[in-house]
Image (spheres, rainbow, N blue to C red):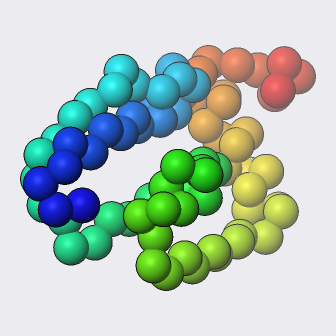
Amino acid sequence: LNKTIFSYREYDHSFGRFSEWKHSRKQFEFIVSQGLHANYELLNEFSDLKVHLEMPDSLKLKLKLDRDSNLRNQSEKAI
């Protein structure tokens, strides 16, 4: 990634959408990509090492319910 423009977007959980594209000319020794789209095909060409961590389904469900009810103001029935 030496002297190239690196474009990226961030996911905003409060709105449930990706941000506008951001661009950087910084030189990175490490890039950390996390979340649902961490293994996105375009990132693979920049990856020397990939580590996947997975949480239990019960914890995923709890976090999603908490997020949708607290940040997105949805009822448990709607979720």
Instruction: Classify residue 1 as left or right of residue 51.
Output: left
* Camera-nearest residue between 41 and 73: 41
Q: Residue at x 46, y 70 (%)?
A: 47
Q: Is residue 32 above or below residue 35?
A: below
Horizontal side of residue 26 vs 30, given as left or right: left
Quarter of the image for the C terminus: give it: top right
Confirm whether residue 72 shows in the render: yes
Please indicate, yes or no, whether residue 14 appears anywhere in the rendered image.
Answer: no
Q: Position of residue 15 (x, y in %)?
A: 51, 20
Q: Position of residue 8 (x, y in %)?
A: 35, 39
Most extreme residue toward the right is 77
Q: Quadrant of the N terminus?
A: bottom left
Q: Is residue 69 left or right of residue 9?
A: right
Q: How many marks?
A: 0
Where residue 56 appears, as percent x and y from the top left, is: 79, 70
Q: Return the residue nearer the eye: 79 or 47.
A: 47
13 to 34, vertically: above or below: above
For the point 53% across and 23% down, the residue is 17
Q: Where is residue 34 shown, x and y percent of the image?
A: 50, 58
Q: Residue at x 82, y 62 (%)?
A: 58
Q: Residue at x 12, y 46 (%)?
A: 25
Query: Is 22 on the left-hand or right-hand side of 33?
Result: left
Location of residue 69 (image quadrant):
top right
